[in-house]
Amino acid sequence: MLRMPKTISALALGVAISAATVMPAHALSLIQPAYKPQQQAQSSDQQAYPASAFAAGKGEEATPNGYALSQTEINHIKWCAARYTSYHPSDNSYMAAAGTRAQCRSPY
C-alpha cells in the first residue's frame, strides 16, 4: 500500500533533478540580476573614456621608458626576487631564517 506513494515520490524527485540539471540556473529566478546591462552601465552622457585617460601621466609620474618604477627599482626587485623565493615586492620583505619578515637590501 505504501509502495505507490513512494514510487510517485521517487519519480517526481527524479524529474525535478533532471529538469534542474538541464535548465540554466537563472531560468526560474524570481530576483532581478544585480548588474546592469552594458547599455545602461555607461554614464548618462553616453560618453566613453579613451584608454589614454587611464595611462600613467597626469596622476602618476611616469619615467621616460613608460614605467612607473625607475630602472634602479626594477633591478632591486629582480635581485631580491632571484635571491629570496619568499620575497614580496609590495612591502620589500622576505621570510628570514628566524621565521620573521625582513627588509631586502640589494646592491641597487
Image (cartoon, helix red, strand yellow):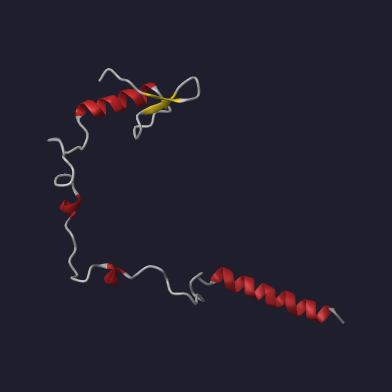
Quadrant of the rendered image containing residue 15: bottom right
Q: Looking at this rendering, what residue extends furthest in the top direction?
A: 107
Relative height, residue 21 to residue 52 (above, below)? below
The foreground one among 50 and 60 is 60
Q: How many numbered marks appear?
A: 0
Q: Quadrant of residue 66?
A: top left
Q: Looking at the image, which residue is at 27% across and 71% down?
A: 39
**At 51% from the left edge and 69% from the top edge, which residue is drawn?**
25
Is 70 on the left or on the right of 86, as rendered?
Answer: left
In the current view of this chain or complex, which residue is farthest to the right? Answer: 1
Q: Position of residue 11 (x, y in %)?
A: 71, 76
The N terminus lies in quadrant: bottom right
When asked about the image quadrant of residue 71, the answer is: top left
User: Taking 11 as reference, is 70 above or below it?
Assistant: above
**Residue sitting at 28 percent across and 72 percent down?**
40
Name the foreground residue: 24 vs 108.
108
Return the x and y of residue 70 as percentages of the image width and height: 20, 31
- Establish if 3 lies above or below 104: below
Please provide percent x and percent y for residue 105: 32, 20
Q: In the picture, which quadrant includes the C terminus?
A: top left
Residue 54 appears at what percent x and percent y? Answer: 20, 51
**Left of 87 or right of it: where is 50?**
left
Q: Residue 86 vs residue 8: left or right?
A: left
